[in-house]
Amino acid sequence: MTASVEQQTVDRVCQFLEEEQGLKNVLINEFTDVLLSNNWICLIYFSIVFCQVFNDSVHGHMELRYIKQLGGAYFVYPGASHNRFEHSLGVGYLAGELAQALKTKHDNEGENLIDEKDILCVQIAGLCHDLGHGPYSHMFESVCPKKKVKCNSTDHEQISIEMFDYLVEENGLKPLLQLYGLSDHDLSFIKEMIDPKPRDKDGNWPHKGRGEDKSFLYEIVSNKTNGIDVDKFDYFARDCHHLGMQNNFDYRRFLKFARVCEAEDGKKHICTRDKEVYNMYDFFHTRYCLHRRACQHRVKTVIEIMIKDALSKVKDIKIEGFEKTLLESIDDMAAYTKLTGL
């Protein structure tokens, strides 16, 4: 190396390494040897690993920074400028918090329902659950042709799974995931949590990532059973904050009283105490208020119709550097990463 880094701060070291061409393509295990041979502190190593994941511009997750969470509502509520990226960070965090809360409670009772790998998979699913959103979020789904899927998925959920596969392959993330003990089996589990499938007509378990004994894990990120999931925990708090509305639902109380129980259907579900009925009422009432006052606001609806008309005028123009048009990009994840709402 051309300079000494022993006395530099962690941030300075990360900046220094980004400038060193020779380290850009070094595998993680080789990189660890380099650090150990130079007697660098472990803190620097972990900072570099996480910088690779979150700060590398080729990662398609960054496109979410430019996609408004509430689409055309920004033109009605100027404060609603938040984006899908920060929402995804929040969902990833809350997914881990709920999984850890359940693990702690049941571990204390001698029930090993959740392990650390489960928690990591849940966090990644929360972080990547909205990768499939296009410009102006849900509005773009009504413009694009429907994808042919074998279940009742929304388009953005199906595209999120395809985008996840693309990012893992394109950015060579397999070695990094294996470093944390994640196998192909776990990657399937992550994708299944992004878009859980319903049971078939005979009630058979549809997933391969985890067995039916861990069915409750599929209710954390995207709950198709009753709609109570951490995705809504985050966007209730985030949307209400930016819209200037009141959010009466207390997700911290839910985390405090949630546990895994066998319900009347004989299946394991995430449940809460009966005394929390009013908090759960506030959950659904907050969702109703958000839809009535923001998501279905009449001016916002008119503005989005105008945006759709504008998109229809350019739908046959090819994306720069690709052979796909705006609407065809849903079948080409590399082209899809170029779409933003700005």
Image (cartoon, helix red, strand yellow):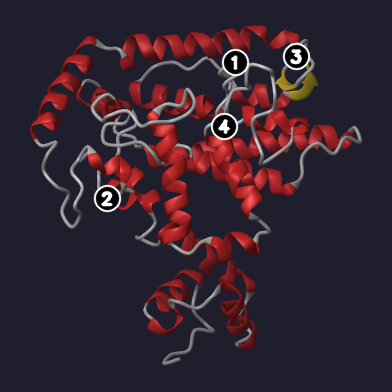
Q: Is residue 34 visible?
A: yes
Q: Secondary structure at mark 1?
A: loop
**Label whose residue precedes the other's in the sequence (4 or 1):** 4
**Label whose residue precedes the other's in the sequence (1 or 3):** 1
Residues at marks 1 and 3, CA–CA distance in whole angstroms: 16 Å
Foreground label between 2 and 3: 2
Residue at 76%, 25% in the rendered image: 259
Residue 157, compared with residue 304, is above or below; it is below
Residues at marks 4 and 1, CA–CA distance in whole angstroms: 12 Å
Q: Are marks 4 and 2 in contact (CB under 8 Å)?
A: no
Foreground label between 1 and 3: 1
Q: Circle 3 is placed at which residue position?
A: 273
Foreground label between 4 and 2: 2
Q: Are marks 2 and 1 in contact (CB under 8 Å)?
A: no
- Type of amino acid under label 3: Arg
**Label whose residue precedes the other's in the sequence (4 or 2):** 4
Foreground label between 2 and 1: 2
**Label whose residue precedes the other's in the sequence (2 or 3):** 3
Residues at marks 4 and 3, CA–CA distance in whole angstroms: 20 Å
Q: Circle 4 is placed at which residue position?
A: 221
Q: Circle 1 is placed at which residue position?
A: 226
| Crowd tier of the residue under label 1, counting other residues whose Cα lies within 10 Å: few below 14, some 14–19, many 20 or above | few
